Image: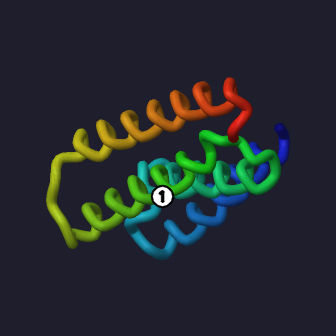
Amino acid sequence: MYWVIASFGLAWIGLSAIGLIWYPLPATSAVTILFAMSAGCVANWVRNRTCHCYFDGPVLFAGALAFLLRQVGVVRFPSFLVWLLLTLGIAISFYLEWRLTSADRC
């Protein structure tokens, strides 16, 4: 369990350090936190093969990328749309884990 927190923390610290130079990645932005959460999910999936992390890593990465593109001005859309899709994607991944692990398929 501690290595998941460490991988998230290291990713967040590294991205925050980049944020000192590049303005779209401050330590408390959704972009930085979602990228770090994505790294934590990938590390958790590699280590434990947790089914929801297999789906959540790419979902969180896509959400962070969408917020990054929005912040630098490449695209324009309301932020609630990304949060809605992230919530839906994460809920679906936990549902799939619940259904697949009960059948011992994941």
Q: What residue did someone put label 1 on? A: 61
Q: Is residue 73 above or below residue 83?
A: below
Q: Residue 39: image x %, image y %?
A: 63, 57
Give the number of callouts: 1
Left or right? Give the position of 25 relative to 18: left
Q: Quick one: SS at disc 1?
A: helix
Left or right? Give the position of 3 relative to 23: right
Quadrant of residue 88 within the rendered picture: top left
Q: Residue 87: image x %, image y %?
A: 39, 34
Q: Is residue 53 above or below residue 73?
A: above
Left or right? Give the position of 45 relative to 48: left
Q: Residue 43: image x %, image y %?
A: 73, 55
Name the quarter where the C terminus is drawn.
top right
Q: How is the image coloured?
A: rainbow
Identify residue type, mark 1. Answer: Phe
Q: Which is nearer the eye, 51 or 43? A: 51
Left or right? Give the position of 82 relative to 90: left
Q: Is residue 6 above or below residue 66?
A: above
Determine the residue positioned at 71% across, 50% down.
Answer: 45
Q: Residue 78: image x %, image y %?
A: 17, 47
Name the quarter where the N terminus is drawn.
top right
